[in-house]
Image: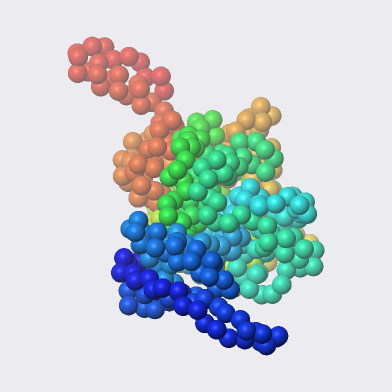
Amino acid sequence: MTTFDVRIWGIQEHKGKDRKTGKPRSTWRLRWVVAGKTFGDSFQTRALAESFRSRLIVAQREGVAFDESCGLPEPMARELKTRSWYQHATEYVDMKWPHASPNHRKGIAETLATVTPVLLSSDRGVPDEKTMRAALYGYVFNASVRAAGPPPAALTSAVTWLQANTVNLSVLTDAALVRKVLDTLALRMDGKPASAATVTRKRAVFSNALRYAVELRLLDVHPLSLVSWTAPKKDEGVDRAVVANPKQAVALLAAVAADSPELEAFFGCMYYAGLRPEEVLHLADDEFERPPKPGEWGWLHLTGATVAVGQGWSNDDQVTEHRGLKHRAKTATRSVPVAPPLAELLTRHIAKYEPADNGRLFVTRRGPGGRYVPTAGQPIPNNAYTTAWRKARKRALTPAQARSPLARRPYDLRHACLSTWLNAGVPATQVAEWAGNSVKVLLDVYAKCLDGGTAAALHRIGLALGLQPPPDPR
């Protein structure tokens, strides 16, 4: 807290003896009162005491607020509290760590490891780029690893150097330096432009770290407010070229069945029900409501997602994390219809591959000699299903299609599903509910994939005008 209730007393001389020599020696003591609390300081010479008193008097006359905790004018209090970027960034990580998801922790570490090399106070003895990044990302900005003990021997000198050679936080009021940091965030490690989504995410982390400094009153203003910097434009729309049509999707699923039959239903959940990969990994046997009869529709009642986070970022040191559904409360559920082809895939999958002990349907099953064996429920690794998908594309698509963006990622099956629903005339509100998106995001992302919209509009206009409607290009 700050106050303007300040009284500054005169300087008093205190005579004594030097402890070492025993010779007479004087010190000059200054006292002042801030909001009823007395503060004081001693100086070796009267000139130093007078200089310090003058600074207090000038601040008082100019209407500068005094900090009640240390008794100094706010600018002097900030100087007293100033800290290096290294110290502030590690404190920010420690503050965020308990409440952040493992993937968010990784995102924070990645961002801070990117900006810190721009915020060095010296380049004398600077570690090489690879070692510095390993020290920052793998130790300094990983609160769990840092709390466990000193850095590995290979990183000790780099960490020690970084502790002593980053700029003071107050330097970040320099707009040119802040702009340099933002320009760095806009690049990938290979120097090429980063995607707009990546820049937006990293800028948000950097901004939040600076906001924390303002919150602690280490900075007067948020440094980003001093810079007029334009981030790359973010195009959220799905490229129509990645969306497989029904014939292509069925061929891809058949190719998966030929090479990795245990994953056919996994990819089928993405194509027929629009699930995200992490939602499929979390799917349990009791979440599949079977259809009343073969050939009819069933339901999936989703309860969460299983996300790969990597070693060292979760609280229990697991490489995966079970969490709630995206953009929903932890205990929220989401129901999605199961088309007859998917119901058949899931029923066949469960009959052939027994669910794991925890009920999960899609778990690692490869045993000795490639046999399929029940497991304790370890989810299928990302690289396992992405490798299977690459093989399926090569088998099912023509060489030209395989070189194109068509269904390049498993996630593109979700795009194909939601595009199919929208093009079939299902209301956007219903598709958004099943997909776990907002209507705005749904339409922003899939606007380019809505085939036939122009023809339908022209047809309605023609009918309204009493004209012969144009032929439907579909």
Q: Position of residue 111 (x, y in %)?
A: 58, 52
- Compared to residue 229, the image places residue 316 above or below, namely below
* Left or right for 152, reference 8: right
* Left or right for 460, reference 101: left
Pick the quarter of the image with the C terminus.
Answer: top left
Between 346 and 239, the one lying in front of the other is 239
Residue sticking out furthest to the top = 467
Q: Position of residue 160 (x, y in %)?
A: 72, 64
Between 358 and 123, the one lying in front of the other is 123
Q: Position of residue 98 (x, y in %)?
A: 51, 70
At x 72%, y 60%, the residue is: 161
Residue sticking out furthest to the front = 24
* Left or right for 132, reference 109: right
Between 265 and 414, the one lying in front of the other is 414
At x 66%, y 31%, the residue is: 403
Tell me if I can see residue 309 in this picture.
no
At x 35%, y 15%, the residue is: 471
For the rendered model, the colour scheme is rainbow
Between 91 and 367, the one lying in front of the other is 91
Tell me if I can see residue 147 in this picture.
yes
Q: Quadrant of residue 358?
A: bottom right
- Compared to residue 338, the image places residue 227 above or below, namely above
Looking at the image, how many numbered discs can be counted on the residues? Answer: 0
Pick the quarter of the image with the N terminus.
Answer: bottom left
Q: Position of residue 348 (x, y in %)?
A: 55, 57
* Left or right for 20, reference 296: right
Q: Quadrant of residue 139?
A: bottom right
At x 67%, y 88%, the residue is: 22
